[in-house]
Amino acid sequence: MDIACISYRDTGFFSQTISDYIDDAPQLRPFYSYRPDIEGFSKLLANKKVVANRDVLATVLTDQYKRISNFGFSISDLVNSNIELLKADNTYTITTGHQLNIFAGPLYFIYKIVTTIKLAKELKASFPDKNFVPVYWMASEDHDFAEISYTDIGGKKVHWWYEAQGATGRIDPHSIRKALNEYKGALGLEGHAPELAAIVEKAYAGFDKLADATRYLVNALFGQYGLVIIDADDTRFKKQFAHIIEQDIIEQNSFKNITATNEDLQKLGVHIQVNPREINFFYLQDKSRERIVFENDAYQVLNTETQFTKAELQREILEHPERFSPNVVMRPLYQECILPNIAYIGGGSEVVYWLELKSTFEHYEVDFPVLILRNSGLVIPKEPAAKIKKMELTAADLFKSTDTIKNDWVKKHSEHTLNLQEEWRELQAIFERLKLRSHKIDATLAPSAEAVQARLKKAIDNLEKKLVKAEKRNYHTRLEQIDQIKSDLFPKDGLQERTENFGLMYVKWGQQFIDELIRNFEPLDFKFAVLTE
């Protein structure tokens, strides 16, 4: 693929806060620890305090992979090597996290992991005496099934209709058969379709937990690059976090710290992504994940009859830490407590919500990782690429509105002069003389002359619009191609990566699609990649 890069700001799809973060705006510096560049990593590595238990980490990961290897799961030598490397003091993780979207959800799921793998490679080149392991953190405890239950592929929505309860990672995917068949049908039979169909069939029909199905799918795509997949829904991990669980539920530290931070961010005009609760943990059981609240001098589990006194809560956390599940504001802290992590890769909204969390990390004396905006991309296959070339459009043009692209194209290609600015400059010169003459005769007539000038400017602008509109009718057939290009590449008038599944691209290019993403993405350049076949 050929690549063209444009700034995130110029796409019009990213927030002002993200642009400010990339541009090192001074007002955001208090909300993170290190800049997302090699110098920032060098400083973090020099000061990094690892709180994770490396032996426990390697043991749990080995057990998790071993458990599903009984189902014919193939683990690459590089994955095994990376798990072993995690025991060493000079090994660090580069992590991204995401929900268990069926069939890998929209493209940005893939882009997150590619960014993670590529950054690990780049850091190894910059710091050869250290090891960097790419990690995908499965959000297996998340209970929002509606968000992960569908995917869009080639304009078709594939939906898994199921009434799910509790943590999504524990769901048995046996009821996904109808959606699985629809997805395989959307892939077709050509190219690499049989290969991908076999992968998803094995994933969703071969395991009894969605977390294991997702691990199989993601490993099939990324295992060869050494990606380590972690499921933090494990008692041994929760034991390491138990002291923070207890402190935060009883003392409500995260609520106090994040609330104060959010007030400061709002003063800067930052749109707050998440708001903390007084208690930021759920009570987790096989078929439920319910909020914990403090009411009537007791810790209540909502929608149940379960409640604890303070002493009972402390004992429950001590004996069953696995029953306490962090919400969105505490999950990052949990992650940094069980991984020797130095970077988190997330989308625009994620990076902004991580900016809300630094004060909580400081309270618990846990290092705050470098925040990396994941790579974004627009993939253009041959057919639309040919249309774009014929229309002489640039990569930056594609991100303009359809009307703007059409207007600019018509002005550029029309045989007639549609831009009336030259004529207006001539009229302005005449009006300057008229205003001067009016002023000499009667100073009070100057505003009248200016009013006439303003009305004429409006008339000239309207005439120019009519000229462009008329010429657009003359080029109707050609301009229809712009409609088709925008429709193909920006589904629902949004970014391709936020809607389209990777499936049809894999059908066309196979594993080479992943290889090309890894080759072209540059995690520390912070540019939007337009990839053309």
Image (spheres, grey):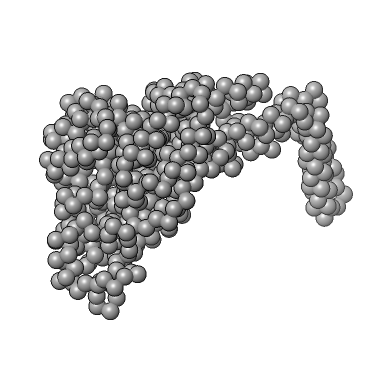
User: Is residue 224 something that shows in the picture?
Assistant: yes
**In the rendered view, does 377 fall on the left or right side of 484?**
left
Judge by depth and name the residue closer to the eye, 515 or 156.
Answer: 156
Return the residue found at the far bottom: 296
How far across and down, in percent of the image, does residue 39 sit? 28, 33
Front residue of 102 and 244: 102
Side of 412 where 378 appears, left or right = left
Position of 21 with respect to 60 (left or right) is right
Q: Is residue 524 above or below residue 47?
A: above
Q: Is residue 427 above or below residue 453?
A: above
**Quadrant location of residue 390?**
top right
Q: Could you say which is closer to the camera, residue 202 or residue 261? A: 202
Image coordinates for residue 279, horizontal then vertical, percent: 29, 65
Residue located 49% across and 46% down the image: 159
Q: Is residue 74 above or below residue 308?
A: above
Q: Position of residue 292 (x, y in %)?
A: 29, 66
- Number of marks in the rendered image: 0
Q: In this view, which residue lies farthest toward the right?
A: 441
The answer to which quarter of the image holds residue 192 is top left
Q: Can see residue 467? A: no
As displayed, is residue 360 above or below residue 393? below
- Relative side of 62 to 268, left or right: left
Q: Residue at x 66, y 32 (%)?
A: 484
At x 27% / y 36%, what residue is drawn? 71
**Residue 251: where, in percent of width, then height?**
22, 67
Q: Residue at x 26, y 71 (%)?
A: 306
